[in-house]
Amino acid sequence: MIESLLIANRGEIACRIVRTARRMGVRTVAVCSEVDRNALHARLADEAVVIGPASARESYLNIGAILKAARETGAAAVHPGYGFLSENADFAQACRDDGLVFVGPSPDAIRAMGSKSASKEIMRTAGVPLVPGYHGADQDPAVLQRAADGIGYPVLVKASAGGGGRGMRVVERADQFEAAVAAAKREAKAAFGDDTVLIEKYLQRPRHVEVQVFGDSHGNAIHLFERDCSIQRRHQKVFEESPAPGLPDATRRAMGAAAVAAAKAIDYSGAGTVEFLLGQDGGFYFIEMNTRLQVEHPVTELVTGLDLVEWQLRVASGEPLPLRQDDVRQDGHAIEVRLYAEDPGRGFLPQTGTLNRLTMPAEGPHVRVDTGVREGDAISVHYDPMIAKLIVWDHDRPAAVRRLTKALAATVIGGVNTNRQYLLEIAAHPAFAAGEVDTGFIDRHAGDLLPSSQPASDRVLALAACQVLIERRAAVAAAAARSADPWSPWNLTNGWRLNGEAVETVRFRDGDAPVEIAVRHRGAGWRLTLPGGEMDASAEAEADGTLAADLGGRRIRAAVIADGDTVIVMDGGRAHRLLRHDPAAAAAQDTGGGKLTSPMPGKIVRVLAKAGDTVRRGTPLIVLEAMKMEHTIAAPGDGTVERIAFQVGDMVEEGVELVAISAT
Ligand code: ADP
């Protein structure tokens, strides 16, 4: 086994590789640019070498500097990750020439697959089905035009050396072809230094289904099943899942066999991905092979239970593949989403800034988080703006989709705009739930996915209010259980008052608009005053987090997710996001210094905590009644209550200290 490994990459993939290497007892060396000196990947590795300035060209793409770092640290092998130099045959060759093991296929295999045109020729010979098209060396405009006319429009012009969707043009009509080719060639030349293009039939609403393959240096090749990456924005993957929803078993087997044939055709060793388009006719067609680990490899890991980086290191060390084809199982369903610092409201413009809040869902058998950043780190202009990958697993697809919405709801990122809400809208969309995935998904549902200017309906507001009221009820009940006199009327949760009817208020912010809902207690439920009128409501939270509500006599079950300051209501196939807006709590928070002061003159109607209690951010501590409304004073952060200065019934002035908390 390789004893030491230099990771020629950064971010989440470098961190992910360190994890497996460490588990296998392999010493790790990170390389980093000057701005990445304190980056997570550099911190996690056993050793880190600064190889150049921030610009990737001078650091992560600098072959000379990387090889020098390998020599100086005595690394025996190099893992290129994905992106950067991972598909650079010259780099693989240079590693070999320096006596280093390159964790990946041979330079020849990388070269063979590096050109979409040349790889198609190899695949055609190996009997792998291709999208009808032209991938010849003759780039004469007249030849290309004739080829396109022969294929029939629409056609897709692609940069042969392309990647990441660049250098691609859809051409609808013959008279647009010449201009489109010229544009694609310009883009390809600038991005890849090679303006060779190929032409393919443009399939209508295909699915992108790819097969993970693995080969070793003993002539074995197998596949680890498929991933469906059809949900794309501008030809770039946004969601990836395994298995592909609704894929007939016969097609799955045929695709697996074709992918293995592709790997064998080039004596493939290591991890690779054979990408296909699945047409609406049920046929599948090779588009390209990626000769590296993919961003979306974790979904394969979660359904097969295998560690692909471990396999890569074993194969690179000369071991045979750990399993035979028949021993590989696809179990349950996994979905991955990519969280980016970008602004969906402004054309998905990449965002830069400091991640002043980064709370990811807790990891476990159902949730995996792959990230290369911590709270306080910066998303800079120099590198990819991906913040994290969120991967979920469950026994079947509907359960995995539910896990995903919950995990996304539990993700809190502050400091930069992100696509989190956008991902949540997709995850909550009925077409996604129905498995209606193809590459046209995002365009088709665009209107549903971006934040709407429509205010939340009364029904959505009522569901959100029920969630908040249930939480308050639970908090009061918990406080009553702790208090000396559990039967005190002050601990009743039904809004009991000595004189008159109590009005409680639930406040939200819906986009920019504040919403105030007055609540009167009615038996086990509430009468809500909503923007559209009064509504009687009652609700119970079920064990799986679903809210079972009765709204004006109609029984409704909806997923309502409380997530810090946010309440997300899944209703009518859309995720509605409301911010809890409690001016009293906000005023109290502003005082800082662990003291909570009274935001206005009023009467203390409930005391829900006592000195010595451990509280979490958002735990209600005191309820103040002022101007016939109740205002809950909640803990601004996690901590211990030092003292509570008042008792129920006390009148307080504005600005006096109500509670002191010491932070934990
Ligand atoms: P890149 O290497 O730039 O990512 P690919 O060849 O892998 O380019 O294609 C990326 C995406 O573009 C595919 O997943 C698919 O959505 C779309 N695409 C590619 N070829 C075709 C085609 N012939 N017809 C329709 N869509 C296509």
Image (cartoon, rainbow, N blue to C red):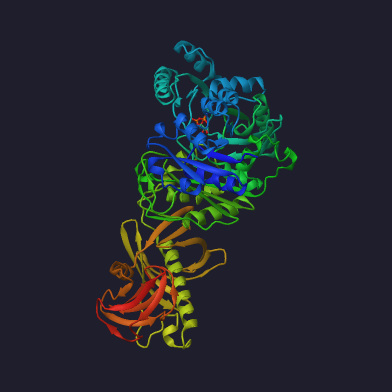
* Residue 213 in sight: no
Q: Quadrant of residue 283?
A: top right
Q: Does 415 appear above or below 385?
A: below
Frontmost residue, 455 versus 417: 417
Q: Dividing the image into 4 quarters, which one contains the C terminus?
A: bottom left
Frontmost residue, 34 versus 125: 34
Using residue 464 as the reference point, say whether residue 362 is left or right of it: right
Q: Dividing the image into 4 quarters, which one contains the N terminus?
A: top right
Q: How many marks?
A: 0
Residue 292, position as x, y percentages in the image? 56, 34
Q: Quadrant of residue 208?
A: top right
Frontmost residue, 634 versus 631: 634
Frontmost residue, 605 versus 67: 67
- Residue at point 63% right, 23% down? 123
Residue 472, position as x, y percentages in the image? 44, 73
Residue 635, position as x, y percentages in the image? 38, 71
Q: Does 575 appear above or below 532?
A: above
* Residue 2 in sight: yes
Using residue 255 as the reference point, say whether residue 607 is left or right of it: left
Q: Quadrant of residue 76?
A: top right
Residue 140, position as x, y percentages in the image? 46, 11
Using residue 264 as the reference point, say whether residue 652 is left or right of it: left
Q: Does 565 appear above or below 126?
A: below
Q: Does 447 appear above or below 603?
A: above
- Residue at point 52% right, 14% down? 137
